[in-house]
Amino acid sequence: MLDERRPPAMNDPHPSPTPRRLFTAIFPDAAACAAIDAERQRWDGLPRRLRPAPDRMHLTLQFFNRVDASAQRSWSQALTALGFEPFRIVLDRAELWRTGSGTIAVLRPAPNPALQDLHRATDALAAQAGLQPESRAFKPHLTTLRHAERVTLAPLAAPIAWTVRQVDLIWSDLAAQPPRYVSLGTFGRAGL
C-alpha cells in the first residue's frame, strides 16, 4: 500500500524543456514521520515556522540541480533496473549543521550497509544516465529543520525506524506556489 503522504505522482511523458531540480529520495512512512516531527517539537529555540513540512521530510540519495529532459528520461529509465531487499533504517541522533544558507537540524541514521549499497546502486544508475554523481562522500541524513540557528537539540527520546521498500525520483518544483515536490516515479518497490 502506498503512503498517502508521498508527493503526488505525475505521469511525465513530456518533460519540461527547462532543466529541473531532481533528486532520488527515501521517504519515511507516516509513523516515522510523526515521530520525527514530535522529536523536533521537543527542541528549544524553534523558529516560528517549522520547515520542512512533515510530508516533505526525506533522506536524499542523489541531487542534481539542473537536469535536462533527455537526462531525466535516461535517469528514469535507468532506475527501472533498481532492485533491492527491504531494509530497516534507524535514525539515532540529531545534529546541527552549518550550511551556506544557514543552520539546519538533521537526524542521522545508524551505520547501515544496505543504505550504503542502495546509494552506490543509485549513483551507478545516475552515472549510466549521464549524470555526474557527487564526488564528496555520502553523509546520509534527514533534514528536520531549516533556520535552526537558535535551536538547542535534545537527545532522541527513542530511535526512529522504518522499512525502506522503494526509492522515489522527485522533481523539486520551485516555480510552483507554494513550491512542491512531484514524484516522477517510484523504483525498486521491494516486498510490496
Image (tube, rainbow, N blue to C red):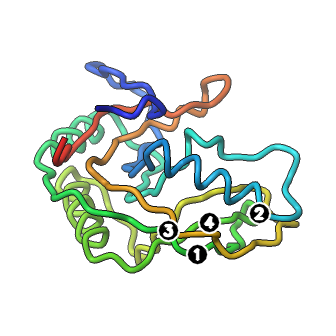
Which residue was labeled with disc 4?
A: 106
The residue under the point 15% across, 51% down is: 82
Query: Distance from label 4 to label 3 (Cα)?
Result: 10 Å
Left/right of residue 17 with respect to residue 53 in the rendered view: left
- The quadrant of the image that shows the N terminus is top left
Q: Residues within 10 Å of mark 3 (few under 14, many from 20)?
A: many
Which amino acid is tagged 3?
Answer: Leu
- Amino acid type shown at disc 4: Val
> What is the CA distance from the residue labelled 2 to the residue labelled 1?
20 Å
| Image x and y of residue 103, in percent | 75, 66
Task: Return the disc, 2 or 1, that comes first in the chain's sequence.
Answer: 1
| Residue carrying label 1 | 93
Label 1 environment density (alpha carbons within 10 Å; few <14, some 14–19, many ≥20)? some
Q: CA distance from mark 2 to mark 3?
A: 23 Å
* Res 175 quadrant in image: top right
Residue 79 seen in the current view = no
Q: Label 1 sits on what residue type? A: Arg
Name above or below for residue 83 compared with residue 71. Answer: below
Residue 77 position in % (x across, y down): 16, 39
Residue that carries the numbered disc 3 in the rendered image: 91
